[in-house]
Amino acid sequence: MRGGRPLKALLLALLGILVFTCGCTPATEPSPAPGTEVPVVERRSFDGERAYQYALEQCQIGPRPPGTEAGWATGDYIMGQLEELGWEVEAQEFLYRGVRLRNLIGKRGQGAVVVLGAHYDTRPVADRDPEHPNEAIVGGNDGASGVAVLLELAEVLGQYELENEVWLAFFDGEDSGRLEGWPFCVGSAYMAEHLTVEPAWVIVVDMVGDADQQLYYEGNSDQPLRQRLWDIAADLGYGTFVPELRYSMVDDHVPFINEGIPAVDIIDFDYPYWHTIEDTCDKVSPQSLESVGRVLEELLVRGDEMADQVNGRRSH
Ligand SMILES: [Zn+2]
């Protein structure tokens, strides 16, 4: 991604028409008669250590640029994880400038479609690295972290009967921008332009694993949805979500905004190893992955409950 000018007109047009549609019910919802004992269903929350394992597995593949064997293997790895966790998987293959790209979408639940997205490709060269500008990056944060959050969410959300049709979208071709004439966000643009249903919203996670996490408001994001996420983070006590505007990014949320769909980018752009060969998994922290994962879990699993709550009363 790169910094860019805010799409102010678009945002204004989107304001006021946003309808939140999220929430869910437990997979086995008991409707007990008075006095009956209710079986307790144990569910676990998003676990940063588990998410971190998904990041490590991607880093072990090595650099994962579009059109390479490693890139394709990463797609296969993501599909394998989703299928194992019981998600229906759609692969969206297409050619861009002669390169075979593939987006992947895991789908689960019924209701209005909501999308959580991340790019799984890594930048082909470390062009911000003064000493190794032609080497490929491993993308521990810029690539692996977002995918790691989505894969751990696949398992966590799988414990529930979702009241939305949740899509976990894995974009190819995000990070080759300004290289050999490529733009950024090729995969997400393809997906946004080929939608057959209109999602209620899209949330993109990118570079969310930095151990020194600072998640500021992103300037192109849909404001009500962004507010809701940062409010949840505050409610959960995550001070790393800073409710102040810092950067406006061209990232995978923008193609959806261009289609009139409310979208938010959760990104920590204060990352000294960005587009250098130092962007490796040791810069990623399980706790940082966990704070982002828990906020998304809260939005999807307890969204409606939270909207109904007053005075900070919690139901769990
Ligand atoms: Zn990047």
Image (cartoon, grey):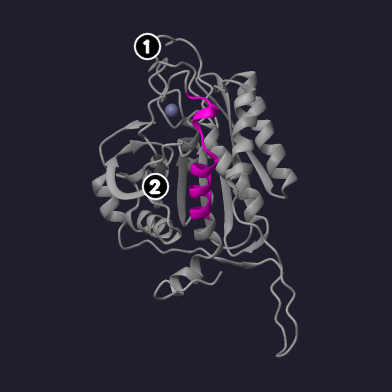
Image quadrant holding the C terminus, namely bottom right
The answer to whether 205 appears left or right of 46 in the picture is left
- Residue 40 appears at what percent x and percent y? 72, 71
Q: Quadrant of residue 36?
A: bottom right
Q: Is residue 54 visible?
A: yes
- Residue 214 appears at what percent x and percent y? 37, 42
Q: Which residue is mark 2?
A: 240
Taking depth in this image into account, of 51 and 84 the one nearest to the observer is 51
Q: Which residue is mark 1?
A: 130
Image quadrant holding the N terminus, namely top left
The answer to whether 47 appears left or right of 303 in the picture is right
Residue drawn at point x = 52 percent, y = 53 percent: 294
> Label 1 sits on what residue type?
Pro
2 or 1: mark nearer the eye: 2
Q: Residues within 10 Å of mark 1 (few under 14, many from 20)?
A: few
| Magenta span | 279-296
Question: Above or below — where is 277 with respect to 299?
Answer: above
- Residue 170 appears at what percent x and percent y? 56, 38
